[in-house]
Image: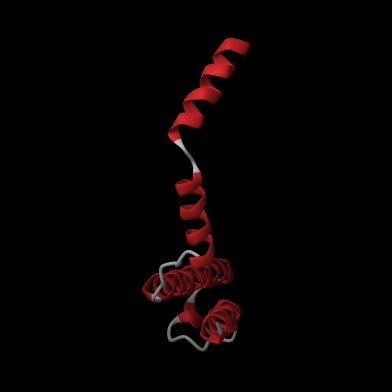
Amino acid sequence: MSMVIRKFFVASMFMWISPIAILYCFNHDLFPGSAHLTPYTTTLLSGFLAVISVNIVIAFYICMAMREPSSKPEPDPAFIANAKASLSQFKPSEAEESSQNRAKQE
């Protein structure tokens, strides 16, 4: 269970850090060539790349979740034993009589 929480925490942190880092780098001209862009283009490009980065993090999180091993749920042995016991106590003749009684009542 702790691995699931750790993966969720790491993915959540990347979902916050990556778009903020992209916006910061574009606004402070840390990407090569971004100093020559107009402010309108810089805003559009940085916003678009920030959204794309979040979608990439979500896709990686989904891939990690799909690759996680899943165990098949096992039924409770006590429940199985009780169900088998109740089925063995049931007699077909009683069922026929009760269905005939219901048919007469209708």
Q: Quadrant of the C terminus?
A: top right
Q: What is the number of callouts on the image?
A: 0
Task: Report the side of 23 relative to 57 (left or right).
Answer: right
- 44 vs 36: above or below: above
Residue under the image location 48 percent in, 70 percent down: 58
Depth order, front residue of 55/67: 67
- The image shows residue 102 at horizontal and vertical percentages of 58, 18
Work out whether residue 31 can be spotted.
yes
- 97 vs 64: above or below: above
- The image shows residue 13 at horizontal and vertical percentages of 59, 83
- 2 vs 90: above or below: below
Residue under the image location 58 percent in, 78 percent down: 12
- 4 vs 80: above or below: below
- The image shows residue 52 at horizontal and vertical percentages of 47, 68
Residue under the image location 58 percent in, 71 percent down: 39
Task: Report the side of 41 relative to 20 (left or right).
Answer: left
Q: How is the image coloured?
A: secondary structure
Depth order, front residue of 23/30: 23
Q: Quadrant of the N terminus?
A: bottom right
Residue that protrudes farthest toward the bottom in the picture: 30
Residue under the image location 48 percent in, 80 percent down: 34
Work out whether residue 106 can be spotted.
no
